[in-house]
Amino acid sequence: MRLLIIGGSDAGITAALRARELDSTTEVTVVVADSFPNYSICGLPFFLSGEVSDWHTLAHRTADEIERKGVHLWLNHTAQSIDPEARSVTVVDQQGRAKSLSYDRLIIATGATSVNSTIPGSGLPGVHQLHSMADTFHMQKHLLDQAPRSAIIVGGGYIGLEMADALTHRGIKEVNLVVRSASVLRSTLSTSVARVVEQELRRCGVKITNGIAVEAIERTGERLTVMGTRGFKASADLVLVAVGVRPATTLARSAGITTGLHGAIRVNREMATNIPDIYAAGDCVETWHHLLRTYTYLPLGTTAHKQGRIAGENAVGGHRQFAGSLGTQVVKVFDLAVARTGLLEDEASATGYEPVGRNLATWDHKVYYPGARKLLLRIIGDQRTGQLLGGQIVGPWQAEVAKRIDTLAVALSYGMTVEALNDLDLSYAPPFSSPWDPVQMAAQGWTRGLAG
Amino acid sequence: MRLLIIGGSDAGITAALRARELDSTTEVTVVVADSFPNYSICGLPFFLSGEVSDWHTLAHRTADEIERKGVHLWLNHTAQSIDPEARSVTVVDQQGRAKSLSYDRLIIATGATSVNSTIPGSGLPGVHQLHSMADTFHMQKHLLDQAPRSAIIVGGGYIGLEMADALTHRGIKEVNLVVRSASVLRSTLSTSVARVVEQELRRCGVKITNGIAVEAIERTGERLTVMGTRGFKASADLVLVAVGVRPATTLARSAGITTGLHGAIRVNREMATNIPDIYAAGDCVETWHHLLRTYTYLPLGTTAHKQGRIAGENAVGGHRQFAGSLGTQVVKVFDLAVARTGLLEDEASATGYEPVGRNLATWDHKVYYPGARKLLLRIIGDQRTGQLLGGQIVGPWQAEVAKRIDTLAVALSYGMTVEALNDLDLSYAPPFSSPWDPVQMAAQGWTRGLAG
């Protein structure tokens, strides 16, 4: 059986390895557009910050490690067309030479691309995006060759915030973050929680301008000027546009594969497309949301790994279903960890829930033990049924914020009520928590608030 | 309605506050044997280590805070008898003056006492136990007045280990830990995981002697000698015996309340005893185990809080059930966090499961991001059904070990399979985890091991 996979990032490589793990007789080939299979895209900001000195270490696995598992990599080849009738894919190398590869099963894992190009001027020298290794090398060269002293970051999502941190860490004193919505991390955090993140950014010298849609970027000499709504105008030596991604699905569409939200490939929960024997996974597909009970476009590395693993399993005869995303995320912003899982109030309302959110500030561990740190926790629950709908935690990044959100994520997987969080047998010793973990204290606060 | 509670530690105070929270018309009185209501017993080692400088801060809540919630505290009063017919309790003060208190509902939260006295010589000067504030002051005085230079700790449970850490931290160079079983933390960890903890203890200068039952303690001048099986004999300036606790239930038994395992009070899952209107909670009761589906004796602070909250709720008319313990625990031993949840192999076998345990060593977060630390994770699952039965994690204490065990604890609450852990949408960013969290990597390792 020949399994062909288009795309060598998280979903594609995970699918390849899973297929080989389950059936070592399968011939698995992965077509990789560049020479960086399975690189950790999430690690790019930490290379640019200087915290990661050698970019080679960003590989989740090296090409050698992947090939040693019996996966054939076609590096620097781009898939140009799929012929579902003939079960073949035409690929071209960097010299434009074409070749046809046959398959019995195909997995499309073409990922996403940055949506930067919608802003006039986003192609100017000195204006960057950050999605691929090539983008990274390009930006690194700019930073090394021209030592920019100021930067404008367009976009208040997690890449925007990580890069505000990274560029500051690298020594750029003047970092200006321009955000379209009224608060940073608009799709991740409720406003009151986002304000704490904004305080941290400002504490570390980042200037934030909320509520501005960037309309154009212009270049005068070495200087770039960003213009936006409400008369916004600011200049800097470097501009990074990080306003999101869109699924890379031109190839899939041209083969007759159905797409939906934002042009993402429609898959069922077995990660199968509408065309027999063609699966898809990762940032190029619509993602089943466990709480919304519908498909969304929610590209995340964790999801890509899970979907890839399922596509790989099913391509060799499995029938495993993707359990669904909860939108669980964490991001480090200077000294804070910022984490959320589940729904925001507006997402929950739109789905017919009656969400109520309540914040609680408390210590990560017993305050008598040295080093206690204050956390802000937000619990969102349905006021009619008491069902837990989501949670957010912000606190010093050493305060087990990331794994505390996971407690809520597992609870959400099972449709727990807020009140039932108090039944969970969570670990405690004074250096780590309290007899009621902060997530349980927040749950108790939520219930008291509802009663009072 | 008059609610009387005997015992002012975690279970008793939590019950009192919960009752008042739900029904502010209830008159709530708590009889407290000493003057330290709601002190954090788990914090005692950190006071003795010197990490906590003021013992007052060990109070979860001060007496003032408790009384401000409308709870009457009878400090320094001991309950002597219960008359279930008359619905009254006789208490005596420190001068031996008796008084009768009437109740409509009674909660017994008398806790546990150390079992030290079974070893001949355990009452000698210089031989300590550590269960109450009085024990702590006694030991602190010994440490301050006589500056002991060597110590023998009898018992390899979590108090023994925390105190080995504490006494070393305080500057005692020669600390000798004498353990009855073949490895430390025998009731908490599988042997292979316990060995890592023993390495850490030895690295920090603690001498460990496993497999010795202590038979007697003798005193010669200022020096104490501990003798045990297999000819064991060692001397030191101070001895701490920490070989466990037993439920303090003489009072309850004399009132006709049924007791069971180790003499602990039998309660149903509403925390009601066999006598109408008498509830019990905390270290004095048998505890429902969620996985064993039976009662055990498993005294833990977290459990005491949960049971107290339920007893308080039900005493004012509720019908809430205790969900059950999973035995989740974490302890800090020098630079390690040591955590477990669920069953050990032998507990699981005895219950009819077919447990298989597998270890995986991996990094807490992406190794390219600075500060990655190696964790050892053990997954125990049933080889017939694939059900998750338990987990253990040992790693540097800043590596989110405690809250990672909580992911497994929530999963255990829902009877998840090991394989289903891979479906969980857990948080990831390079400073915090990997796209598959270590607990998921350990789950994949477990499944591969079973297949291979």
Image (cartoon, coloured by chain):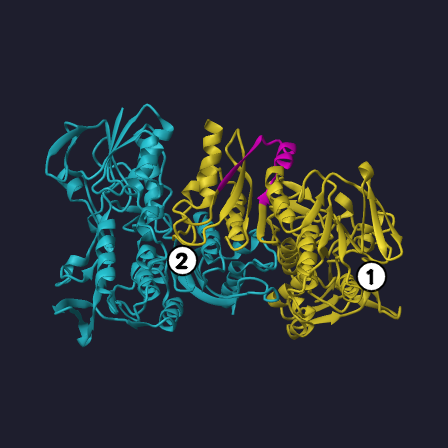
Chain colours: A cyan, B yellow
Q: Is residue A329 above or below residue A308?
A: below
Question: Quick one: B390 or B372, which is closer to the camera?
Answer: B372
Q: Is residue A15 above or below residue A58?
A: above
Please, what secondary structure does the residue beneath circle 1 have?
loop
Q: Tell me the chain of label 2.
A: A
**Local crowd size for mark 1, using a 10 Å CA cut-off: few (<14), some (14–19), many (≥20):** few
Residue matched to label 2 = A340
**Image coords of residue B159 (percent x, y):** 69, 53
Is residue B269 in sight in this rendering?
yes
Count up the numbered dots.
2
**Local crowd size for mark 2, using a 10 Å CA cut-off: few (<14), some (14–19), many (≥20):** many
Q: Tell me the chain of label 1.
A: B
Q: Residue furthest front?
A: A145
Is residue B157 in sight in this rendering?
no
Q: Amino acid at mark 1?
A: Ala
Is residue B285 found left or right of B231 in the rendered image? left
Q: Residue at x 65, y 52 (%)?
A: B270
In magenta, the rendered stretch is B341-361
